[in-house]
Image: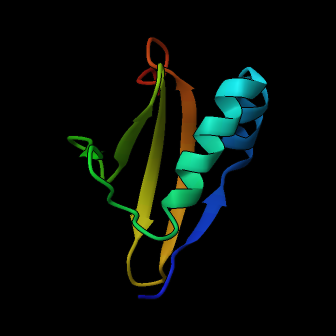
Amino acid sequence: MEKYNVVFTKSSVKELDEIPPKDAKRIFKRISDLAANPRPMGCEKLSARPLYRIRQGDYRIIYFINDSSRVVDIIKIGHRREIYRL
């Protein structure tokens, strides 16, 4: 099966930099796994938007999947209490 390319927005890179290193390492591993399976167990499609969400501890990763070009676009990374304030 062909892998997906994972692309970060500038803002998501900045958000990842602000997360404590121990948590950031786990989040980055979780994001890397999206290349092989962009819809892993536990991912949820967000209502009213073509976006998906996965959890990693207290953090949430919001992303967009483009199946035709095989790209996973990381939109937002943040703590669960702040993430949905788009």
Count of numbered circles on the image: 0
The residue nearer to you, when weighing 20 against 83, is 20
- The answer to whether 11 appears left or right of 81 in the picture is right
Residue positioned most to the left:
47
Instruction: Between residue 11 and residue 40, name the one nearer to us.
Output: 40
**Which of 66 and 39 lies nearest the eye of the viewer?**
39
| Colour setup of the view | rainbow
Q: Position of residue 39 (x, y in %)?
A: 32, 59
Residue 64 lies in quadrant: bottom left
Can you say whether 3 is above or below 34 in the image?
A: below
Q: Classify residue 48 as left or right of residue 59.
A: left
- In the displayed structure, would residue 74 be above or below residue 58? below
Task: State the residue at coordinates (37%, 42%).
Answer: 53
Q: Residue at x 74, y 42 (%)?
A: 13
Please name the residue shown 52% across and 68% down the image: 35
User: Residue 24: x and y, percent?
Assistant: 69, 32
Tell me the quadrant of the picture where the N terminus can be found. Answer: bottom left
Q: Residue furthest top?
A: 81
Q: Nearer the viewer, residue 54 or 68?
A: 54
Q: Please state if 14 lies on the left or on the right of 51 as rendered.
A: right
Residue 7: x and y in percent read 64, 62
> Above or below — where is 37 with respect to 17?
below
| Residue farthest to the bottom, as pictured | 1
In the rendered image, the vertical position of residue 3 relative to residue 66, given as above or below:
below
Asked which quadrant contains residue 32, the reply is bottom right
In x, y percent, where is residue 71? 52, 72
